[in-house]
Image (cartoon, rainbow, N blue to C red):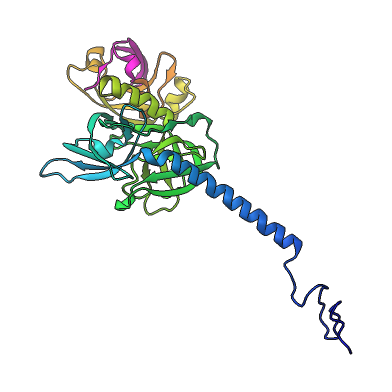
Amino acid sequence: MLIDVAGDTRDDGLHHPPGGLTDPVSADARQGSESDQHLLDAYSEAVVHAVETVGPAVVSIDIARGRRQRGGSGSGFVFTPDGFLLTNSHVAHGASRIHVQFADGRQYPAQLVGDDPDTDLAVLRIDAPDLAHVELGDSSRLRVGQLAIAIGNPLGFQHSVTAGVVSGLGRSLRSRTGRLMDDVIQTDAALNPGNSGGPLVDSRGRVIGINTMMIMPAQGLSFAVAINTAKLISGQLIQKGRVRRAYIGVVGQTVELPERLVRAHELEESGGVLVMEVAEEGPGARGGLQKGDILIGSGGRRLAGIDDLLALLTEETIGEVLALRIIRGEEERFVVVIPEERH
């Protein structure tokens, strides 16, 4: 059969569309490709924008801790125009010398203003001109699934960027002091040693958390102290150099109460705080607390475990009268304790 070139009609058993000898990409495929490229560009632009916004305020931190102690390194960021920086307590605690370096190569000595191991936060200060500083976001407005970008200096690789999503909110983790850190952000943005203290950022370049730890060898389990916690703690550190908390002079542990005690004392939860030790001349001893007592409440507030007790002992309760509800043996009593400031 003759070949009609204009219509590309052939007797070869194949379908050839008119207009050429090659099969062009279909309209649907072309549209899908353009849509995918648009999404990729939007994601990339969000990350690039956030990094360009926050990056100039991020520093690497080099720590010395004396002749016999190992130094360390981490990350941090400037959050005020007059040179205050946020980082982790475990990065800066006990430092005898601190130096910070910006991405543009500028280096400055830094002073430790104060740190709070219970929330793993520290504030540093540098004296330097023309400092870029970040905008702090509002971690109470975060949503699971939104973009989260981590900037830091992992394993000595300066100014590295990883991105992921907010994987969970309101997590609780133990600090190095054993105290429970509340309102922790979980993310799958990859963190490594050296990222500690660096910012976790949203798509608009606002800091939403301070990267604090990852769980090894798990993948995609990283955590950051919520920025709203950091706002509160950093204000106290700048004003006082430390965070004030109350102390009653007892060592306790969470215990499950026998069912008979739960029923007898009409408790909705079966937990309590068993007093293991009472410090001599401490507030608890003066109030009459004894080893073996079980704390179950205070002023209408249920104490179902050690974390409830720690949450009660804040700056606000220093010097206040606490009527502690306890079980001694089988009997319920009230013991009056006046907490002191913990040193």
Residue drawn at the location 35% of the way across and 12% of the way down? 323
Residue 319 lies in the magenta-colored region: yes
Q: Is residue 217 above or below residue 179?
A: below
* Quarter holding residue 248: top left
- Viewed as shown, does residue 68 lie left or right of 53? left
- Viewed as shown, does residue 285 lie left or right of 149? left
Question: As rendered, which of 294 and 163 lies closer to the eye?
Answer: 163
Q: Position of residue 285 (x, y in %)?
A: 22, 16
Residue drawn at the location 66% of the way across and 56% of the way down? 34
Residue drawn at the location 71% of the way across and 57% of the way down? 31
Question: As rendered, which of 294 and 11 lies closer to the eye?
Answer: 11
Segment colored magenta: 314-343
Q: Is residue 340 above or below residue 141?
A: above
Q: Quadrant of the C terminus?
A: top left
Q: Position of residue 3 (x, y in %)?
A: 86, 85
Q: Position of residue 339 (x, y in %)?
A: 28, 15
Residue at far bottom of view: 1
* Quarter holding residue 224: top left
Residue at far left of view: 67
Q: Is residue 321 above or below residue 28?
A: above
- Viewed as shown, does residue 66 lie left or right of 246? left
Q: Is residue 271 visible?
A: no
Q: Position of residue 163 (x, y in %)?
A: 47, 48
Residue 205 lies in the magenta-colored region: no
- Viewed as shown, does residue 75 lie left or right of 184? left
Q: Is residue 139 above or below residue 73?
A: above
Q: Quadrant of the N terminus?
A: bottom right
Residue at far right of view: 1
Number of numbered discs overlaid on the protein picture: 0
* Quarter holding residue 244: top left
Q: Is residue 33 visible?
A: yes
